[in-house]
Structure formats: C-alpha cells, structure tokens
C-alpha cells in the first residue's frame, strides 16, 4: 500500500469499479447497473434545470452538462454515469444545420441525398468541441470512483437522421440511398465513422472510462444488409479507439439477428434490447464479450412485485453471460417514476451481491 499516492488512488478505484470489472468479464461484488437515458425527462430536477434552455444549447454548457450527468448518479446510486449530450452534437459542431425539436428529436435543415451534399461532412477536431473536453474533465473530478461513459451515434443511425432529415420509422430514404447508390452510401458512412471516432477520442482523452456506440436503428436492417453496408463503418469506429484500452459497448434496438456482428464489430460489451433473454443473447454473441441489458423499459410501470420478478429474470439469464451489466432494453421512458428506478438499483445490488 505504501506506493499508493493520493493522486493515484481515485484512478485505481474507478478501474476497480463493479462496472469496469464487469465490462472486462472479471468477478464483481454485485451486478453493476445504469440506465440508458438515466439523465433527462424522468427527473424533476432535470426539467427544472433545463427550463428556458434549448437541448443543444444545454449540451454546449459544461456547467449544465456536469450537473445533469450527476443528477441520476446522486439520486439512484447507479454504478456509472452517462455523459449528457446527444448523438447529433458532433454534427452540429462541424456546421450541419440541425436542431433538436422538443417532442420530436433531431431535425436536419438540408438532408444529405447526393454526392454534393457530402461536402457538409468535414472532419471534426477537438477545437470544434471545447465544451465536451471541459465538461468531461469537470465530471471526472466530481465523479470520483464512479466511471463516466462517453458515447456517440454509430454511422448508420447518424446517416438515418441526415438522410431522412429527422426521426423515421421505416428509414425509407436511407435504405433507398443504400440500395440505389452503394458507393455514395459507403462514402457517407465512412465519413461519419471518421467524425464519430474523433468525437469518441475527445471524450476518452478528457477522461471517459468507457464508451458506448449507439446504433439504435440498425435493427431495421437484414443481417446481410447490415454486414455489407454498415458493419465495416462501425468496425472502423470501434477499432479507432481500441488502443485506449477503455471498454467499448455497442448497442442497438431490435438487433436479435445482428448480435454476433455487433460483437464482431469490435465491442467488448454487447447491449441487448428486451426482446431476447440474455442467456440466448450470450449464445448468439459467442465467447469473449460481456452483455448489457435488458429489462423492458415499460416494465417499471407495473406494480413493484412484477418489476422485481422481471428484474430477477434478467439477473438469472445474465448469469449465462461472461460479464453482465444490468440496464434497460432501451432508454428510460419520460413518464417513468424515478423512485422505481432507485428501488430497482438497490434491488439489483442486493439480489446479486456475492
Ligand atoms: O429536451 C429534451 O429533453 C430532449 C430530449 C433528449 C435528451 C434528454 C434528446 C433529444 N436527447 C437527449 C439526451 C441524450 N441523447 C442522451 C443523454 C443522456 C442519458 O442517456 O441519460 C443520450 C445517450 C442520447 C443519445 C441519442 N439521441 C440516441 C441514442 C440512444 C437511444 O435512445 O437510442 C438517439 C437515437 C438520439 C436522437 C434523439 N435525440 C433526442 C431524441 C428525442 C432522439 C430520438 C428521436 C427519434 O425517435 O428518432
């Protein structure tokens, strides 16, 4: 113990946190838990803080980002913080004309549909996002032993917003471009891979101790189309940050048929939605990777006894994985009662204590 200095101590404890241990598939004192979208509309303290500030403006204010990121950690006692930002922030930062409309999501003024439109996508440098470096730095100081997860949108999901011009159910224009002009599509997702990689690097270099790559809408694709048209770009992103040695989590919705490829893309941890049990997901993903998930986000609206039973099912199925991080199958729904989430964290911790 004599060589443990005061400055090295906080670092050592983050590294030894249940969350990072589970990512590395090491033994844990309890199953770690955090929730996608844990910061945000389910919390009254978030709604209060955000009053009068537009979503994208709040992402560019380190004081607000720090406070919003910390809110669910304080309230719920989750095992990791997720950086408060949005997947479109790097696109805004390189000058794409877009906004996040309340109740809608990201809306792009000039959608990308031709080769000329690609010129909108220049490289991202750390100077484009000084507020990210500052906020991550502040947070790492405040969080102490709690790890901070940085994140970015994967090329397919970002491409969907850019090509459609906004949220989309069927991704028809995106797929039309993918099938109709495969070369333009390949160039588009490759450009996005560069931007996403640069955005993740900024967060890791500022101190994020894990990253999550969200390919939320990749489940809209067949396995063959995913392999041919999306996997290379996502692989490029995950490979670009491999040398940092921070765990890479890769998540999408409706990806039951894609799970093995989500691992092959270079994920250390594969995020699983609520549609398949984790033991089955573990078989599909194969050895050498941890899993994250996968309680249905709607379950928390049921009476507590039902929530607890469903959480226990997730914990039992999660024993079939080499490492398990408890999470929802997608984000926290806006009307969720935050007290149920706090209770869920305590339950996961006590039920999984070993
Ligand atoms: O004013 C508001 O509160 C706007 C709502 C909101 C919030 C709180 C948006 C708009 N983004 C965010 C923050 C956000 N976005 C986080 C941060 C913190 C946390 O997890 O606690 C994260 C990780 C994201 C990532 C994100 N944005 C994804 C991937 C995750 C997922 O849920 O699948 C996606 C697809 C987006 C796009 C987006 N931004 C906002 C909305 C409403 C959407 C989805 C729109 C759609 O349905 O297509």
Image: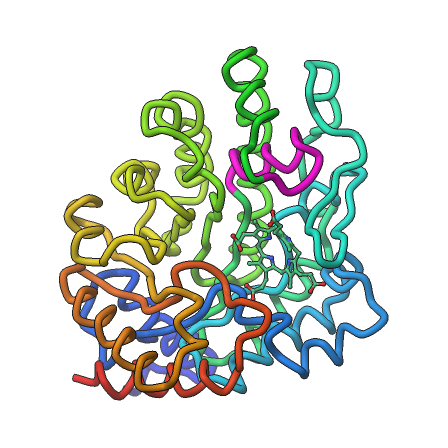
Magenta span includes 157: yes
> Which quadrant holds residue 142?
bottom right
As drawn, 98 above or below 122: below
As drawn, 257 above or below 250: above
Q: Residue at x 31, y 38 (%)?
A: 258
The quadrant where ligand 1 appears is bottom right
Horizontal and vertical percent for residue 163?
65, 29
Residue 222 horizontal side relative to residue 321, left or right: right
Question: Looking at the figure, which quarter contains the N terminus?
Answer: bottom left
Magenta span includes 267: no
Residue 2 horizontal side relative to residue 329, left or right: left
- Which span of residues is magenta-colored? 154-168
Q: Residue at x 33, y 54 (%)?
A: 272
> Which quadrant holds residue 262?
top left
Q: Residue at x 34, y 79 (%)?
A: 307
Question: Looking at the figure, which quarter contains the C terminus?
Answer: bottom left
As drawn, 303 above or below 83: below
């Amino acid at each position: 113990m004599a060589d443990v200095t005061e400055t090295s101590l906080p670092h050592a404890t983050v590294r030894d946190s249940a969350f990072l241990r589970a990512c590395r598939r090491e033994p844990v004192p309890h199953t770690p838990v955090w929730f996608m979208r844990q910061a945000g509309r389910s919390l009254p303290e978030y709604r209060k803080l955000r009053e009068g500030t537009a979503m994208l403006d709040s992402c560019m204010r380190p004081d607000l980002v720090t406070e919003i990121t910390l809110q669910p950690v304080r309230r719920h006692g989750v095992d990791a913080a997720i950086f408060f930002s949005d997947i479109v922030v790097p696109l805004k930062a390189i000058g794409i004309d877009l906004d996040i409309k309340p109740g809608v999501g990201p809306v792009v003024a000039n959608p990308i549909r031709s080769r000329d439109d690609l010129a909108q996508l220049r490289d991202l440098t750390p100077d484009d996002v000084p507020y990210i470096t500052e906020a991550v730095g502040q947070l790492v100081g405040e969080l102490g032993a709690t790890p901070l997860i940085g994140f970015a949108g994967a090329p397919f999901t970002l491409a969907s917003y850019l090509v459609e011009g906004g949220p989309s159910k069927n991704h028809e224009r995106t797929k039309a471009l993918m099938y109709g002009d495969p070369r333009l599509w390949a160039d588009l997702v490759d450009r996005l891979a560069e931007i996403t990689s640069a955005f993740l690097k900024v967060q890791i270099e500022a101190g994020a101790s894990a990253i999550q790559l969200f390919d939320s809408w990749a489940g809209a694709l067949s396995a063959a189309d995913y392999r041919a048209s999306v996997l290379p770009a996502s692989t490029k992103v995950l490979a670009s940050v491999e040398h940092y040695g921070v765990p890479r989590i890769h998540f999408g919705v409706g990806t039951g048929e894609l799970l093995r490829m989500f691992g092959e893309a270079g994920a250390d941890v594969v995020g699983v939605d609520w549609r398949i049990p984790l033991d089955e997901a573990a078989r599909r993903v194969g050895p050498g990777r941890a899993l994250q998930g996968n309680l249905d986000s709607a379950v928390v609206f049921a009476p507590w006894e039902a929530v607890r039973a469903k959480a226990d099912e997730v914990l039992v199925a999660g024993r079939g994985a080499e490492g398990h991080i408890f999470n929802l199958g997608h984000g926290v729904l806006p009307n969720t009662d935050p007290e149920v989430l706090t209770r869920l964290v305590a339950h996961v911790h006590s039920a999984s204590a070993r």
